[in-house]
């Protein structure tokens, strides 16, 4: 029998994140598809009762919790100890978890301790005749594999945003408290804070509805034979402030900082999307002045609706990859877009 | 940054025994031969290093491209020299290698009527079409019923030179006796003057600081002082090594954060194998001049695709097709079939193609779309793309092969056989000849003087098949100076008479041949219209050839995103072109005023990567990120330098980046 | 501070990022088409970790960097000719498959074994570096497993900054959600850091470093231990390029104002 464990950590306020509910959806669906299986939930945090209650109506038969102040921190030693304890206590054969930065840090190590295996960047899980298969990405999202494993436990980290969230109703969950003794060696690391980007810094914001992708064309010479970088900066900043979009950038634009060329001052490698950058998930994406084929366009693989503005009708970001390509001057279009946005606010 | 400033910079110095510039087939032949004999079977040095006593000679090779095997070209070769070095050569070990099978030469007619054909060719075309039923004619292509034996490569190999070079590089480095460093361009040749006042230069210098008494070959072309006899003054100049490219600089070479001055690598022998457009070869020619009556005036740019052929392809591995006649009569084409449904195919656009809009990329697409070829290519997919200059002057372009402290090998040394269209085998052979000479000198502890190198390397080269065949070929292509038909006849005549009879005269510098678009299209496109189109293109920052070709009736390219892709997508999908940050522009417009008065701007039209575009005040812009280092701009420039009619206004210097495909 | 660090960097090789990749079936499972023909580079994120390691060692006299790398020997040799000019290191080479479809746990076992075999390794001085993900398997799992095998309880992933305080404690910035960084303080060694990009530029080529490195690189390659992976229990049902071709509506003749209006409507929808 498969024991499917949804393993989640609580947020600082004790709640469950959307990504945890998405992983729960995967776990619950898997449980439904595998005839001889049980679904259990494991939660880690300073206090997990409210999180467990929030999903109490899900088909889980048991709830396990590792609680305490030591487990409020996102820290390898304590998180591995807690996850290991829940996995052992629950007898989990399949462990489904959201691919948060916290779980990404630890679950491969837990799998190692338990003699198990781990798959990450999973964007789909299915079961046919009791045989479980996962879809995951290889080579930086450039190819997708479907694979299955005989060994257990099998850890599955589900990419946030790739699955619908479980809409289980709340109730009262009965939690079995799993006690974890921590040695001093587990507490050599202390989380001392979180550094947030400056309020006006533009980074990839996962919660944004729109990903605005800037390409190297913004800094190139324009129709009048001159580059207009300050104007480009103003337009892009203006749009981001008005639209609250997330800012992504092609590699070539980020790289120009090393060339002594005029660049967009607010861009850093944190903005880079594509083969050597991020592959964020957003409902909509607008690419401007971008050029390039694979692997550059990998950056907006997980953007649902895509539009592009480019003077080149053969733009590789657009043809076959976007829903709409506007063959137009992005400077002119974005000037008007900002005007219209400003008028509406 | 000018050299005056450069010489003030404190530079580190490293000493080696032999330093090589460029890792192409010639240097590979050199290192493959040399590396086998530096160490005894028991691991002890067979020859002792002068700079690291007790160790075998320290042999370093610096290659400008980002990996070995990038930026070279697919090839069909008789492989005589390669097999001499590797007698047990197993082709199966080299990806994409296969024996030559069927060879065909095709004359392609123009299905669109857009090409520019002479009256003689038009007559020939009409004859062929009229009697096509009795000729080996299909799909607008005529298979020549007979081709002269000197064109045949039977018994040879079809290779991806990129893959071959990677294989050869691995063999050489596995010996552990030589080091090949890619991504490390050599910027300058270090030349020491024999002036006694500078004698301290020959004494060991400290590990840091400017080497005293050393003059530096300039990336820009120096103007000799009026009235001096360059050859006499410099006859005892000695090459003492090389200077690597500065890192951490802006486009103009000015230091940025992280500035790292290029190191001086001093060596008793500098082996220059940096190809037909290599900056070190250029600097040597500027410093030592060319031998009397020798010059480099014949060139071509070769542009190619590597293609996954459709699954049902009828082309067999080893098939070799050569074409002429289309898309313009002056443009030659090739298609070589590798194993596993892969083909290398492309065109050569020669310097004597007098069009001022000699754009290889668009012509390559029209060539692929020719019905004779498209039936094989339709449904294929682009794997790789690239372009390269070919030095077509052959033996006439041979520079001084040796001097004190240096020797030249490979294509830049004039080894390419322009009659048989063979260069790799010859280049490799010159490398092995030099290696044998170097070993001979090292074993008897003789220094690398001009005389000693002449008595060993040059002597071997002169006595070899490379020289013998180069003499036959020397004037075989002169007829092309007066047209394609005459050129083809001249080649046949020279080939069949072993070079005794040739057609045509001395080639002229390319710039003398280049008309303005207004002249070239006289009677076809009104001058006012050309000027209007030029203005529009300049504002858009694009070259002129596209609109002119459209205007002349060339059909639009039906892009399919697979094989027929935009030029920029070819750079990305095929060439994977990249330029690491922190290096100066390697294409420099020396005298802006010459560009401003230039009417043709052929550098923009001919640029293989669209890296040169219209710029401010009539001076073109150069975009390093798009440059494939083909070097076509160097010899296409229509503006000669005021003090040197053999050179144009574009300096093509050492630079990194470019193609990142190893399949070319 | 007079601490001497032993910094072991785990870095594999991956196809040069701009290459066209296509999966094919091979007798040993999925592989890349023309895998041995594709130009290779040191894994980008692991490269950052190597630069960080070298920078750290440079500022802590007596410290040393080892580069543990697993890949086909011929490819490793090729990649080393680019990497070896960048920073000083001693290579520990493992000759085996370097593709992304190998199992992280098996790779980790080999890497850990190679690290443990480094002569004179002292865990109290040990920092293990690597990339937080590779550009091949892209799992972000191998380093944690290496750390577990080495008994390292202080591990960090997505690291962008490491500062070492006078008391030898480490302050580490890790990437977390929302473009933020978590700041952690670790009392001391050993520790394992999976790096994101860090903050250092790619070092310039230095021929002298290249010369020195080659004295150990070639011997290391010559004695590279051959490794094979069984991939037991793992089976690939399918590996494919994503089918992502979209019908692109090309809008050519609208004025910038009209395009702007259409974009606004779409954004607000």
Image (cartoon, coloured by chain):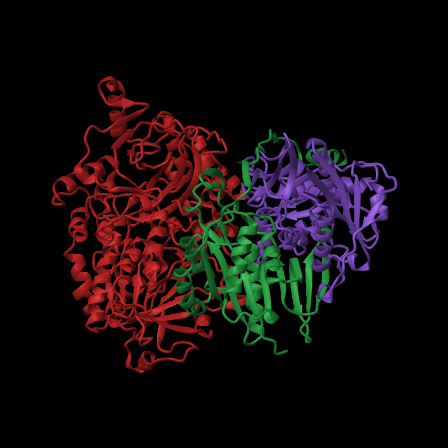
Chain colours: A purple, B red, C green
Looking at this view, is B304 or C67 the one in front? C67
Q: How many marks?
A: 0
The residue under the point 28% across, 46% down is B90
Quadrant of the rendering where the C terminus of chain A is positioned: top right
Across and down, in percent, residue A153 comes to: 65, 45
User: Could you tell whether B425 is left or right of C154 in the image?
Assistant: left
The image shows residue B321, relative to residue C207, as above or below, that is above
The image shows residue B517, relative to residue B146, as above or below, that is below
Name the image quarter holding residue B128.
Answer: top left
Across and down, in percent, residue A3 comes to: 71, 40
Residue C40 in sight here: yes
Residue B354 in sight here: no
Across and down, in percent, residue A306 comes to: 65, 36
Residue located farthest toward the right when viewing the structure as drawn: A172
Quadrant of the rendering where the N terminus of chain A is positioned: top right
Looking at this view, is B535 or C5 the one in front? C5
Name the image quarter holding residue B494.
Answer: top left
The residue under the point 74% across, 54% down is A82
User: Could you tell whether B630 is left or right of B287 in the image?
Assistant: right
User: Could you tell whether B571 is left or right of B635 in the image?
Assistant: right
Looking at this view, is B373 or C112 the one in front? C112
Across and down, in percent, residue C157 comes to: 65, 57
The image shows residue C150, relative to residue A64, as above or below, that is below
């Amino acid at each position: 029998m498969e024991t499917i464990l949804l393993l989640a950590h609580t947020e600082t306020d004790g709640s469950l994140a959307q990504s945890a509910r998405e992983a729960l959806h995967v776990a619950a669906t898997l449980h439904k598809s595998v005839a001889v299986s049980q679904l259990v939930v494991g939660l880690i945090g300073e206090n997990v009762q409210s999180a467990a209650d929030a999903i109490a109506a899900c088909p889980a038969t048991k709830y396990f919790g590792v609680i305490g102040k030591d487990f409020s921190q996102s820290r390898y030693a304590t998180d591995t100890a807690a996850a290991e304890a829940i996995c052992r206590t629950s007898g989990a054969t399949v462990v489904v978890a959201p691919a948060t930065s916290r779980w990404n840090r630890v679950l491969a190590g837990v799998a190692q301790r338990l003699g198990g295996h781990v798959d990450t960047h999973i964007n789909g899980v299915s079961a046919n005749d009791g045989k479980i298969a996962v879809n995951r990405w290889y080579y930086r999202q450039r190819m997708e594999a479907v694979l299955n494993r005989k060994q257990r436990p099998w850890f599955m980290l589900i990419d946030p945003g790739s699955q619908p969230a479980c809409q289980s109703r709340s109730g009262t969950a009965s939690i079995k408290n799993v006690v974890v003794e921590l040695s001093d060696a587990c507490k050599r690391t202390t989380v001392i804070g979180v550094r947030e980007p400056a309020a006006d810094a533009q980074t990839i914001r996962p919660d944004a509805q729109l990903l605005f992708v800037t390409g190297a064309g913004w800094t190139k010479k324009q129709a009048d034979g001159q580059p207009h970088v300050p104007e480009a900066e103003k337009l892009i900043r203006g749009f981001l402030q008005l639209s609250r979009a997330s800012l992504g950038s092609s590699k070539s634009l980020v790289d120009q900082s090393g060339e002594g060329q005029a660049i967009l001052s607010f861009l850093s490698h944190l903005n880079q999307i594509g083969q050597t950058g991020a592959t964020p998930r957003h409902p909509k994406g607008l690419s401007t002045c971008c050029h390039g084929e694979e692997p550059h366009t990998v950056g907006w693989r997980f953007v649902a609706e895509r539009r592009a503005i480019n003077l080149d009708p053969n733009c590789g970001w657009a043809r076959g990859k976007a829903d709409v390509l506007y063959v137009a001057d992005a400077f002119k279009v974005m000037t008007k877009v900002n005007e219209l946005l400003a008028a509406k606010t | 940054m000018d050299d005056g400033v450069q010489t003030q910079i404190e530079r580190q110095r490293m000493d080696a025994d032999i330093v090589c510039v460029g890792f192409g087939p010639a240097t590979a032949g050199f290192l493959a031969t040399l590396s086998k004999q530096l160490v005894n079977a028991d691991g002890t040095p067979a020859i002792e290093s002068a700079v690291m006593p007790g160790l075998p000679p320290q042999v370093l090779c610096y290659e400008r491209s980002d990996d070995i095997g990038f930026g070279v070209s697919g090839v069909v070769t008789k492989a005589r020299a390669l097999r001499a070095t590797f007698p047990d050569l197993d082709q199966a070990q080299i990806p994409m290698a296969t024996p030559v099978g069927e060879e065909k030469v095709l004359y392609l007619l123009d299905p669109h009527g857009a090409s520019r054909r002479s009256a003689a060719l038009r007559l020939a075309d009409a004859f062929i079409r009229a009697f096509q039923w009795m000729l080996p004619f299909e799909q607008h292509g005529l298979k020549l019923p007979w081709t002269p034996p000197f064109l045949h490569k039977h018994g040879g190999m079809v290779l991806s030179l990129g893959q071959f070079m990677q294989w050869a590089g691995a063999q050489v480095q596995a010996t552990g006796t030589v080091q090949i460093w890619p991504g490390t361009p050599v910027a300058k040749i270090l030349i020491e003057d024999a002036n006694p006042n500078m004698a301290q230069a020959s004494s060991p210098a400290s590990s840091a600081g400017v080497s005293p008494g050393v003059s530096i070959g300039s990336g820009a072309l120096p103007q000799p002082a009026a009235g001096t006899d360059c050859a006499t003054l410099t006859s005892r100049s000695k090459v003492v090594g090389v200077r690597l490219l500065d890192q951490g600089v802006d486009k103009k070479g000015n230091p940025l954060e992280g500035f790292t001055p290029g190191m001086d690598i001093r060596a008793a022998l500098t082996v220059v194998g940096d190809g037909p457009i290599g900056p070190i070869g250029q600097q040597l020619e500027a410093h030592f001049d060319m031998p009397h009556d020798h010059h480099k005036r014949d060139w071509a740019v070769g542009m190619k695709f590597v293609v996954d052929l459709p699954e049902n392809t009828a082309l067999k591995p080893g098939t070799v097709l050569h074409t002429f006649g289309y898309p313009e009569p002056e443009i030659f084409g090739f298609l070589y079939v590798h194993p596993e449904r892969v083909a290398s195919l492309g065109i050569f656009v020669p310097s004597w193609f007098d069009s001022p809009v000699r754009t290889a990329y668009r012509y390559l697409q029209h060539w692929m779309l020719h019905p004779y070829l498209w039936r094989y290519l339709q449904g294929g997919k682009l794997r790789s793309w690239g372009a390269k200059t070919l030095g077509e002057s052959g033996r006439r372009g041979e520079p001084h092969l040796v001097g004190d402290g240096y020797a030249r090998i490979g294509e830049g040394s004039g080894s390419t056989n322009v009659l048989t269209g063979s260069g790799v085998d010859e280049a490799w052979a010159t490398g092995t000849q030099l290696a044998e000479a170097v070993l001979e000198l090292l074993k008897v502890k003789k220094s690398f003087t001009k005389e000693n190198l002449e008595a060993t390397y040059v002597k071997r080269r002169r006595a070899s098949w490379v020289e013998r065949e180069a003499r036959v070929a020397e004037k075989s292509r002169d007829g092309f100076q007066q047209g394609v038909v005459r050129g083809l006849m001249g080649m046949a005549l020279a080939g069949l008479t072993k070079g005794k009879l040739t057609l045509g005269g001395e080639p002229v510098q390319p710039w003398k041949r280049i008309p303005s678009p207004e002249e070239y299209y006289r009677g076809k496109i009104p001058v006012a219209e050309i000027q209007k189109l030029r203005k529009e293109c300049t504002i858009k920052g694009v070259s002129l050839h596209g609109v002119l070709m459209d205007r002349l009736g060339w059909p639009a390219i039906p892009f399919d995103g697979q094989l027929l892709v935009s030029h920029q997508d070819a750079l990305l999908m095929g060439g994977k072109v990249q330029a690491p940050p922190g290096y100066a522009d390697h294409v420099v417009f020396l005298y802006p005023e010459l560009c401003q008065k230039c009417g043709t701007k052929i550098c923009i039209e001919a640029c293989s990567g669209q890296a040169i575009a219209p710029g401010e005040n009539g001076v073109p812009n150069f975009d390093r990120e798009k440059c494939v280092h083909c070097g076509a701009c160097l010899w296409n420039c229509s503006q000669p330098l005021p003090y040197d009619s053999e050179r144009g206004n574009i300096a093509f210097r050492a630079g990194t980046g470019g193609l990142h495909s190893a399949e070319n | 501070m007079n601490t001497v660090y032993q910094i072991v960097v785990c870095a594999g090789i991956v196809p040069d990022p701009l290459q066209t990749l296509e999966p094919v079936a091979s007798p040993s499972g999925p592989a890349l088409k023309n895998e041995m023909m594709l130009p290779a580079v040191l894994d980008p994120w692991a490269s950052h970790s190597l630069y960080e390691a070298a920078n750290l060692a440079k500022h802590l006299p007596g410290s040393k960097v080892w580069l543990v790398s697993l890949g086909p020997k011929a490819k490793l040799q090729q990649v080393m000719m680019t990497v070896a000019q960048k920073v000083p290191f001693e290579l520990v080479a493992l000759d085996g498959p370097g593709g992304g479809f190998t199992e992280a746990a098996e790779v980790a076992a080999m890497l850990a074994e190679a690290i443990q075999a480094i002569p004179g390794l002292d865990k109290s001085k040990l920092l293990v570096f690597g990339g937080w993900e590779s550009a091949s398997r892209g799992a972000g799992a191998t380093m944690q497993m290496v750390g577990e095998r080495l008994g390292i309880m202080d591990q960090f992933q997505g690291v962008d900054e490491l500062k070492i305080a006078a008391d030898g404690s480490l302050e580490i910035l890790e990437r977390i959600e929302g473009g933020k960084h978590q700041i952690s303080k670790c009392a001391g060694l050993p520790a394992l850091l999976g790096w994101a990009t860090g903050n250092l530029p790619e070092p310039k080529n230095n021929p002298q470093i290249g010369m020195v490195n080659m004295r150990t690189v070639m011997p290391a390659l010559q004695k590279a231990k051959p490794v094979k992976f069984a991939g037991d229990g793992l089976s690939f049902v399918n590996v494919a390029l994503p089918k992502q071709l979209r019908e692109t509506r090309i809008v050519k003749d609208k004025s910038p104002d009209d395009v702007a209006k259409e974009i606004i409507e779409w954004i607000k929808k």
